[in-house]
Amino acid sequence: MYRQGLNQFRTVRAETLRLAAGISQARADFRPAPKEWSPGEILDHLLLAEKLYRGVFADLIALDKAGKRPTMFVGFDEVNTSIFGIPREILPLLTAPFTIFNLFVPPLARDIMLRYRIAPARNPSVASPVRGKPVDELSAELAASLRETEDLFAANPDANYRAMRFHHPMMGSNDAARIFRLVALHEQRHQTQLQAALAAAVRQGIGVADLEPSVTK
C-alpha cells in the first residue's frame, strides 16, 4: 500500500534536488521579500517536514509491532499548522470546528489547497527553517533524508500499513498512502515557491556568476 506513495515521493524529491543543484550560497540566502523565505529556508523546511512525517510513520509502525492499533491523534499543541492568518495561540480552541469541518471536505479539495497556494498558510513551529545554512549541506541532507525514509520502510515490509491512520484537525484523517500524498503535495507546493524565489534572485542579479548553467536556463 505504501509503495506507490513512496515512489511518488521519490519522484518529487528528485525534482527538489534538481532545482537545488548548483544554487550559489548568495542565492540560497536571498529573500524575495522581507517576510518570504529564501531558497535555503525552503529547502530546510522540506527537510524538517519530511523528518516530521517520517517520525509519524515510525510511531505508527512501532504501535503495529507492539500489537496495538496503529492510529495517532495529533493536535495543534504538537503540530500547529495554521491557515488564513489564524494565530497559533488560539488553534487548540479550534480543534473541534476544524475536525468537524474536515469530515465534509473531500480529499481532492484538501489536496488542491495543499498543493497550490490558494489559502495563506503558516508552517508548524516544528518545521520552522533557519536562514543561512550551507546550501550544499541542505542538498546532501535532503538526499540522505530520503534514504532514511526508504530504509524505514525497507526494514518494516510486513507492517500493517492498511490499518494505519493519522488524524489531525487541519489535515483530516489519513491512511498511510494519503500521508505520503500529503508529503509529496506539500513538497510540490514549495517547489513552486522555490522556483519563484530563484526567479526573483535572477531578476535582482543575485549570485548569477556563481550558478551552474543548468540553473540559469
Image (cartoon, grey):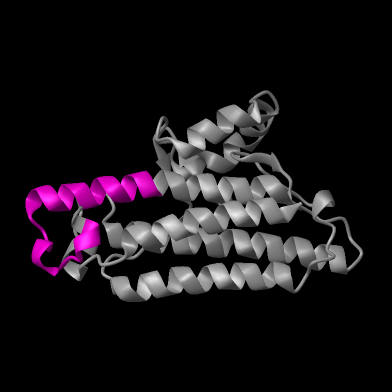
Residue nearer the viewer, 210 or 28:
210
Is 37 left or right of 140, judged from the image as shown?
A: left
Report the label total: 0
Residue 19 image-quadrant placement: bottom left
| Residue drawn at (8%, 51%) of the image | 204
Residue 210 percent coordinates (x, y): 14, 69
Residue 207 percent coordinates (x, y): 12, 63
Residue nearer the viewer, 79 or 22:
22
Q: Give the range drawn in magenta.
A: 191-215
In the displayed image of the protein, which residue is found farthest to the right? 67
| Magenta residues, dominant SS class | helix
Is 217 left or right of 177, judged from the image as shown?
A: left
| Residue drawn at (20%, 68%) of the image | 24
Residue nearer the viewer, 14 or 56:
14
Residue nearer the viewer, 139 or 66:
139
> Can see residue 128?
no
Q: Does the magenta stretch include residue 208?
A: yes
Compared with 41, 92 (above or below) is above
Residue 109 image-quadrant placement: top right
Q: Does the magenta stretch include residue 149?
A: no
Is 35 left or right of 167, judged from the image as shown?
A: left
